Image (tube, rainbow, N blue to C red):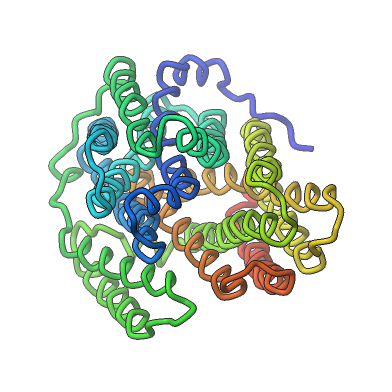
Amino acid sequence: MPKPAVPDADAQRRAFGWRFVAPLCLGSALNPINSTMVATAVVSIGRDLEVGADRTVWLISVLYLTSAISQPVSGQLADRIGPRKVFVAGSVLVALGGFGGIFVRDLWGLVALRAVLGAGTGAVYPAAMAMVRQRADSLGLPPPNRVLGLLSTASLTTLTIGPLLAGLFVESIGWPWIFIINLPIALLSVFMVMRFAPRDGARSPGERGRLDSGGIVLFSGAIVALLVFLMNLSSPPWWLLVLAVGLVGGLIGYERRHLAPFIDVRMLSSNAPLLLTYVRVVFGFVVLYGAMFSLSQWFEESRGLSASESGLLLLLIFGVGAMLSLIGARYTVIRPPLLIGAIGMLVGAAMMVVVTGSSPIWVYGLLCLAFAPSAGLAGIANQLAIYIQAPPAQIGMASGLSRSAQYIGAIIGSGVIALAFGSQATDAGLHLIGWILAGAAVLVIAATLLDRSLDQR
């Protein structure tokens, strides 16, 4: 068992006290809680607005789209102009989205609010990572594992709380509160950052540079085309995949010639460890989101569990995962927690292949527990890997790309569920999903074993 990380522990506690860390955790929690609250509220919204699922789906997908674009864009802005400024700007956008929830009551107005929330919440996480890196580097401290663990735990906890909180809102004070709740949280986060976080250091003209608008447009187009394609795997629009590949090729060629690129493809092409980390993130989230959404649907439709019973079982994934992330944050090693998480994915996927609607409830509990290490230990380990593998001046952009990778994995997982279940969650469909997720888990294991940079930790 590796020894807990102790170097400079006192210095880290002084540098990263609760006043600095608390607003970063609040801000980092905004994106996952907004991505999950709508899952519980979308049926009520459609019923009240008299629109079908084919239109309310935009309330879900638009946040994925805007967040996937906003995260790396905001990450580059954080690297260029300062993370504290970007954190505050993103939080203000979230507050505006929450304020709009008080008044807006038509579908496309709500979709617009979700886009604002996606852009705002997408800006906060990479800015928070850049603030942590800036603080540690300015004081000559090693990676603050405890802080990274708290950021990961905040995300995992709100992934779990989101559907339960939205259910309470829908049943008591109304679904508009899934928007309005963002207002007080964002304002509190802004106040605490402005009050307690150190100001951004001065940027030289070379560091500021000019924003690469061409690269941002090409990247955004590629992401939109790819994600819309992945959302429609049941009848795939292949032309969108061709368009996405073409835009990626154009992006690579364009960025290689740009003096201050939005995405430093030269750095990425020569940074195999960082690319392998992104591979682990994509396929890890294929497994995590594929398991979470398929099991919740299957528990209710095939096993006949209630929504609250299903939610309690899913707590074993994210609740236990949150506790594991806090334990993992005490250590500096990366490969062991990644392997433990990946093996847990493989075990959970294998159980999905054999479980049936008549299996005892304790088997479902063990099935969910198998995925907990991938949510907790692997999450904090990948976060630490990006912190170490990315160049210090590009940590914001690299962290933003990692969140884009998460959304790509999540949407692939959702597409797999649509293909396997169709209109009804069945045992056969769950078994097919299990086989696919097992293949993704094997890819995560391979990407972990091939990453030789992890031997240095």
Pick the front one: 359 or 222: 359
* Occupied quadrant, residue 153: top right
Q: Quadrant of the N terminus?
A: top right
As drawn, is 411 to the left or to the right of 440?
A: left
Residue 285, position as x, y percentages in the image? 55, 57
The structure residue drawn at horizontal position 69% and vertical position 29%, both measured from the top left corner, is 4
Please count the marks in the image: 0
Q: Quadrant of the C terminus?
A: top right
Question: Percent position (x, y) of residue 437?
Answer: 66, 67
What residue do we see at 67% from left, 60% from top?
A: 301
Residue 238 location, quadrant? bottom left
Q: In this rendering, would 387 be left or right of 295?
A: left
Question: Looking at the picture, how far across and down is residue 28, in whole percent?
Answer: 42, 36
**Res. 184 visible in picture:** yes
Residue 143 in view, yes or no: no
Image: 241 above or below 220: below
- Given residues 226 and 172, the one toward you in this image is 172
- Residue 170: % across, % down: 46, 38
Image side of residue 41 versus residue 244, left or right: right
Identify the image quadrant of residue 29. top left
Using the image as rendered, state which of residue 16 and residue 87 is in the foreground.
87
Q: Residue at x 26, y 71 (%)?
A: 251
Q: Is residue 122 above or below residue 332?
A: below
